[in-house]
């Protein structure tokens, strides 16, 4: 959208330093992308904020368009109305997990509770463990 002229259909919060985002959605597609930081490696380039934009632009083939080898560790969720996928980069290996429709919980470090999202409604909202 207004933040990213190369992605006119995308809305989300903008990272003013790196020009990326941690969460963005495609208005027409109803697909959302969310990046969660992991603990294995906390620094690297490029910024993880490019991940949601790459995922929305390329869909599940985004790893073909972006080298994550020097990036800090992350989980990337790509959730649409019918299905979703999580990619986990632990600074060693990029793993893909396809998700069935329904409610799912995803955290940045494989412990409870990070972010909960529903693929049925393709929405995301933050949740914190107590």
Image (tube, rainbow, N blue to C red):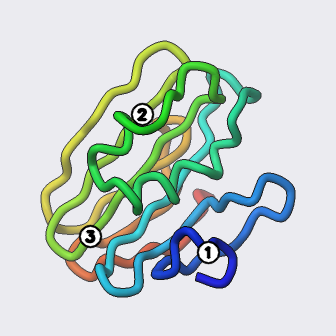
Q: Which mark is residue 88?
A: 2
In percent of width and height, residue 46 lies at 68, 36
SS of the residue under disc 3? loop
Q: Residue at x 71, y 30 (%)?
A: 45
Calculate the distance from the C-alpha at mark 2 to the C-alpha at mark 3: 18 Å
In the rendered image, residue 86, in percent from the top left (x then y), is placed at 34, 45
Q: Residue furthest right?
A: 17
* Residue 123, numbered circle: none
Crowdedness of circle 3 by 10 Å Cα count: few (<14), some, many (20+)?
A: many
Left or right of 105: which side holds 113?
right
Observer-side mark, 1 or 3, equals 1
The reply to whether dot 2 and dot 1 touch (C-beta < 8 Å) is no
Locate residue 95 relative to residue 35 in the image: left or right. left
Whether pointer 1 and pointer 3 mark residues with C-beta atoms closer than 8 Å, the reply is no
| Residue 104 coordinates in the image, percent (x, y) | 30, 59
Of labels 1 and 3, earlier in sequence is 1
Tell which circle, 2 or 3, labels the residue nearer the N-terminal end: 3
Local SS, label 2: strand
Q: Residues within 10 Å of mark 1 (few under 14, many from 20)?
A: few
- The residue under label 3 is 80
Examine the rendered structure and indicate whether residue 18 appears above or below residue 32: above
Question: What residue is drawn where x is 29% and y is 79%?
Answer: 29
Q: Looking at the figure, which quarter contains the N terminus?
A: bottom right
Report which residue position mark 1 lands on.
5
| Most foreground residue, 3 or 44 | 3
Position of the C terminus, as image quadrant, is bottom right
């Amino acid at each position: 959208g207004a933040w990213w002229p190369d992605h006119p259909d995308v809305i989300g919060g903008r990272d003013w330093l790196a020009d990326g985002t941690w969460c963005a959605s495609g208005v027409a597609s109803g697909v959302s992308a969310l990046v969660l930081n992991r603990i294995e490696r906390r620094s690297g380039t490029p910024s993880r904020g490019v991940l949601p934009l790459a995922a929305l632009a390329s869909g599940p083939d985004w790893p073909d368009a972006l080298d994550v080898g020097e990036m800090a560790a992350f989980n990337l969720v790509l959730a649409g109305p019918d299905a979703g996928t999580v990619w986990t980069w632990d600074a060693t290996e990029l793993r893909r997990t396809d998700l069935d429709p329904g409610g799912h919980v995803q955290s940045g470090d494989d412990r409870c509770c990070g972010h909960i999202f529903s693929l049925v409604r393709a929405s995301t909202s933050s949740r914190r463990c107590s």
